[in-house]
Image: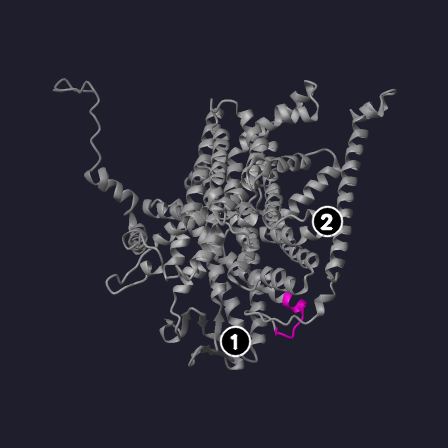
Amino acid sequence: MPSPQTPFVALIPIPPAPPPHGERGVFGWLRANLFCGPLNIALTLVCVLLILLAVPPMIKFLLLDAVWSGSDRNACLARPERPVVGACWAFVAERINFFVYGFYPIEERWRVDLFFAALAFGIGWLTWLDAPRRGLGMLYFFAVLPVISFVLLYGAPRLGLPIVETAKWGGILVTVVVAAVGIVVALPIGILLALGRRSSMPAVRLLSVIYIEFVRGVPLITVLFMASVMLPLFLPEVWSPDKLLRALIGVAMFSAAYLAEVVRAGLQATPRGQYEAAVALGLGYWKTMYLVILPQALKITIPNLVNSAIGLFKDTTLVFVVGIFDLLKTVEASRIDPKWATPVTSLTGYAFVGLFYFVGCYVMSRYARYVEARLARGEQR
Amino acid sequence: MDAAENAKPGLSLLYNRRARAVAYQLLLCTAIAALAYGAIRTAGENLKRAKIASGFGFWNDTAGFDISQTLIDYSITSTYGRAFWVGLLNTLLVAAIGIVLATILGFAVGIARLSRNWLLARLAGLYVEVVRNLPLLLQLLFWYNAVLNALPERLQDSIRIPGGGYLNRRGLFLPEPIFGPGSGAALVALFVGVIAAVVYRIWAKRRHARTGFAPPLWPVVLVLVGAPPLVVLAFAGFPIAVEYPQPGRFNIHGGLEILPEFIALLVGLSTYTAAFIAEAVRAGLLAVPRGQREAAQSLGLSARHTLRLVVIPQAMRVIVPPLTSQYLNLTKNSSLAVAIGYPDLVHIFAGTVLNQTGQAVEVIAVTMAVYLSISLFTSLLMNLYNRRVAIVER
């Protein structure tokens, strides 16, 4: 209680004093995040050392010392006036058409470009969640696009498109074809397998489980080997599929089993009430699945589907092992080509391939995260 | 419901749900059986036409090729069966060491991503993003063709490793311990010591629970494990010698030679898998609710005890299932060895043996069966462990 002599009583709360100088601003942030305690100081110093050891040489190699133009290996060899040679981008620039199209005939390459455009259009339609007529987009992607692509890439003499044997396909074209087949063909099979695994019929369930667990238990390489050496044995000689088709069958078989598990997780996450409501409305099995369950299950699996697509995209490099000219194989073949073989050619080639895959995978993973956040937004009303 | 439907008289069999289910399944099984029969018949004809033998008669034939890394005795005159075992052991060797390294690196990176140190967390995040978004095959080729190929080629320029090792383009040469007579007994003694330590630990735990006083654990365990083999070795007069690699005129002789292919595969596999393990570890640690830490602190547990008794046991429940699948992935991915020429199962068996014998069906079936059994066996072990650490609800 204030005594009668109290000269002054504050009428409003006194504003809090600012934190001490060392806790604020850049220095405060540095102290809190980098230099709190001896252990953290040591860790920070080690990190700085690592960055100093790794980043400047990398920038020097990839950009500063790099060779940007030239027509053969002489441009990328160390010379007295140029003792340190960085990445040989001239090599990539000269070979870029080979890396993109492989041995595809030069006058027919517009067909490949058109295929890339058609594929990009389909992917854009499906991944833009607010796009109009997405149902039509599905039809386009899973039914129309495969036919268009086959006609475009392989050719149809009746339409005036000369046939280009798959042995001439290569580079990014093959990488994209393998990845696209791994999704477009494998997803419907995967959905059927997932439904089979949750079926009430024991024989269907058992067969689905055996298939899924068998394929998931073996490496992709053995599946590819199986497809490339055993398929010709099991099929009559007249149907004998060519090398690329065999690898595509292997990739589709492999990817279907993984996608089946992803879809199954989505099916399991769909509330039971949805099944019961559909049954109560008198819908049969296929209508229940097509109209009620799959739209919801597939929507929540989009992030996981994209993650599987990332894995598959990286795994397309394995067709290399059965002798198909995908992007990595074209680079492998070019880097030992005497015309370009220098001490820096390999590293440059790998840096190019790495950049390609990193950008592809990074974009996909960002997209998966975006969809995840968007789906979560719908949940938090 | 089904029973009632079945009992309903007059309903055509066509509309009986159970009858239709049986019919569908019969149809499916017949279709698959017909496909399989057709495939096998065609295969028989094709094999006959190509004059390829069938069956496992080739197993005991002479292989006639050499293998660069063998853990068991093998020579050109050995059989295909022997080559299979060499390949399998090489696969298991790289997988086992790779799993250990990937686990250590993965846990370190996963914990670093959650560090309060901003720079460390960012660096760990960068590592995970870069490594996860590049194909493993590219990384293996990078390690093998770009990094290891940049090592000195000539013997004189080899990088000296402290302790008597050499590193050059032909591989890593390390001092090799040579175990003389009496080492076997020391191994037995070590085994006895480990058993004694386990028994002691169980006893100590029980005593801790009964009396509230914890008997000293680690010093006793150290003595129990370390003393018996040391005593036995002392009696045998320390029969362990170390063979140092000797640089000769053209090559390095003696010591432990580690192939560059093995190093590239091991480094590639462990760094790649570590990025995935790091993500699993991070998710597991984040999955422990904040309240658990706070509760432990308010009980007066120290930071170490909070981590050991409260956080880690709960995080492990979330970490173990993805960790298992990463271990399996690493084992399966070791088959990429074929691309850089490390003599693993796929390279030797599904590669060289298949090419020499032409018996694709048998060879691929055996290779797949091996990976399948490794997968199933590992899942079994991990499920057992998972059951032990899973939440037991009343």
Instruction: Single out the mark in the foreground, 1 or 2.
Output: 2
Q: Nearer the viewer, residue A193 or A29?
A: A193
Q: Nearer the viewer, residue B319 or A367?
A: A367
The residue at which mark 1 appears reads as B231
- Residue range of the region highlighted in magenta in the rendering: B74-84
The residue at which mark 2 appears reads as A236
Q: Is residue B82 magenta?
A: yes
Note whether B349 is above or below B136 in the view shown.
below
Residue A60, visible in the rendered structure: yes
Picture quadrant where residue B186 is located: bottom right
Chain of the residue where label 2 is placed in the rendered structure: A
Locate the C terminus of chain B by quadrant. Answer: top right
Note whether A126 is above or below B167 in the view shown.
above
Residue B217, visible in the rendered structure: no
Query: Which residue sits at x=44%, y=32%?
Result: A370
Locate the N terminus of chain B by quadrant. Answer: top right
Judge from the rendering whether residue A47 lies leftward or rightward of residue B181; answer left or right.
Answer: left
Note whether B233 is above or below A126 in the view shown.
below
Judge from the rendering whether residue A61 lies leftward or rightward of residue B55; answer left or right.
Answer: left
Q: Amino acid at mark 2?
A: Pro
Judge from the rendering whether residue A339 lies leftward or rightward of residue B187; answer left or right.
Answer: left
Q: Residues within 10 Å of mark 1 (few under 14, many from 20)?
A: some
Judge from the rendering whether residue B28 lies leftward or rightward of residue A38; answer left or right.
Answer: right
Picture quadrant where residue B33 is located: top right
In the image, residue A22 lies at what x, y percent? 21, 41
Q: Nearer the viewer, residue B268 or A160?
A: A160
